[in-house]
Image: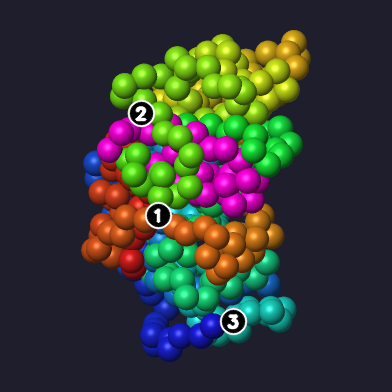
């Protein structure tokens, strides 16, 4: 693993973003809190960069309603999942990681801080020549993209794949992975102003959703897989442009409100799948360090790259960055240098 000079921090306190309530305004506060202690098999990482996910916004505002059951704001938890940084301390039983190693990964929560404790098995060596910002962007977004593509129909070279929401953090990786890993014919759905970006990432065709719905034109042949990262197009419309043995992989389910949303959408897709040869897949990412290593290898080989928007301002910039994510103002993956 690569190494970096460590920033001394012998104290027991650190700065972190804490969540004090639900909503976009006044619910994130930067405070001084105790540094996390280490359990067996854990390492302490000095965080250098974090990436912002849509899930961070959902947890912050408490939507859908069931999210509030998972976030105890009375305890003022530290939000954030994706990080990159330098190992500064290893706990008992850790053998494969050393202080000074540059790593990236995901955690259940706690990344929006100067330090985060992570299981040794969950951290991955940073790809050579990659910045902390790009490594942080790779975690949730890259993992979601590769797992979503695998969740659909078995793809063969030349199969048509449609990525809906192609210019976002996950979509920008999905376009690249569909080309480099599966050798697919990729149609990217995004706004016209981002067409050049997705073409630079490997898209063969681009549909500007501000001009026409991607389901308005039936491709020939039809799509073998549609990866839907937006979730607002009716399932029936998607099925009309999907091959008989194709797959609709829905990663997002729109922005409806309601305590049980999106469970109602998930159950609806599962029920429809029982009566069609098409595969309708409500997708949920599963953290997997092996997938991160796979993505790191592709990055090191130059086959994929993070498309990021870097935000200055450290921990204090995170509240606005998360609000922007909720408002849909993000192109590529938003990352904050800590």
Q: Is residue 200 magenta?
A: no
- Of the image marks 1 and 3, the number of the one nearer the N terminus: 3
User: How far across and how far down the image is residue 79, in percent?
Assistant: 43, 53
Q: In the image, what residue occupies the spot 54% across and 83% down?
A: 2
Please name the colour scheme applied to the rendered image.
rainbow
Q: Is residue 149 above or below residue 28?
A: above
Q: For mark 2, give the secondary structure.
A: strand
User: How far across and how far down the image is residue 82, in percent?
Assistant: 48, 57
- Of the image marks 1 and 2, the number of the one nearer the N terminus: 2
Q: Is residue 160 visible?
A: yes
Q: In the image, what residue occupies the spot 41% across and 19% down?
A: 213
Residue topped by disc 1: 307
**Labels 1 and 2 touching (C-beta < 8 A):** no
User: How far across and how far down the image is residue 26, in percent?
Assistant: 24, 45
Q: In the image, what residue occupies the spot 41% across and 44% down?
A: 199
Label 3, residues with CA under 10 Å away: few <14, some 14-19, many ≥20: some
Nearest to the observer: residue 81 or residue 273: 273
Total count of labels: 3
Residue range of the region highlighted in magenta in the rendering? 166-193
User: How far across and how far down the image is residue 71, in percent?
Assistant: 48, 43
Residue topped by disc 3: 1
Residue topped by disc 2: 208
Q: Which circle, 3 or 2, is nearer the viewer?
A: 2
Q: Is residue 187 magenta?
A: yes
Q: Give the quarter of the figure containing the C terminus.
A: bottom left
Nearest to the observer: residue 251 or residue 320: 251
């Amino acid at each position: 693993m690569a190494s970096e000079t460590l920033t001394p921090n012998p104290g027991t306190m650190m700065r972190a973003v804490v969540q004090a309530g639900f909503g976009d305004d006044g619910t994130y506060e930067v405070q001084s809190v105790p540094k996390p202690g280490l359990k067996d098999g854990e390492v302490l990482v000095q965080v250098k960069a974090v990436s912002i996910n849509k899930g961070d916004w959902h947890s912050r505002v408490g939507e859908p309603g069931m999210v509030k059951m998972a976030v105890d704001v009375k305890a003022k938890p530290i939000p954030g999942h994706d990080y990159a940084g330098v190992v500064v301390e290893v706990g008992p039983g850790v053998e494969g990681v050393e202080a000074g190693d540059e790593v990236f990964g995901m955690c259940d929560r706690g990344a929006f801080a100067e330090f985060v404790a992570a299981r040794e098995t969950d951290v991955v060596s940073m790809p050579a020549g990659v910045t902390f910002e790009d490594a942080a962007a790779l975690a949730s977004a890259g993992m979601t993209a590769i797992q979503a593509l695998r969740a659909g129909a078995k793809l063969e070279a030349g199969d048509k794949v449609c990525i809906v929401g192609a210019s976002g953090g996950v979509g920008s990786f999905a376009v690249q992975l569909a080309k480099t890993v599966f050798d697919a014919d990729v149609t990217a759905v995004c706004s016209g102003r981002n067409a050049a970006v997705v073409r630079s990432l490997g898209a063969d065709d681009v549909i500007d959703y501000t001009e026409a719905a991607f389901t308005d034109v039936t491709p020939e042949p039809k799509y073998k897989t549609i990866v839907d990262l937006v979730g607002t197009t009716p399932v029936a419309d998607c099925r009309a442009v999907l091959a008989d043995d194709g797959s609709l992989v829905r990663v997002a389910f729109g922005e409806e409100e309601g305590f049980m949303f999106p469970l109602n959408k998930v159950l609806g897709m599962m029920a429809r799948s029982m009566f069609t040869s098409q595969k309708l897949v409500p997708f949920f990412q599963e953290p997997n360090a092996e997938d991160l290593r796979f993505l790191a290898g592709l990055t090191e080989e130059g086959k994929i790259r993070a498309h990021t928007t870097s935000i200055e301002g450290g921990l204090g910039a995170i509240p606005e960055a998360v609000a922007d994510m909720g408002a849909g103002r993000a192109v590529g993956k938003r990352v904050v240098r800590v």
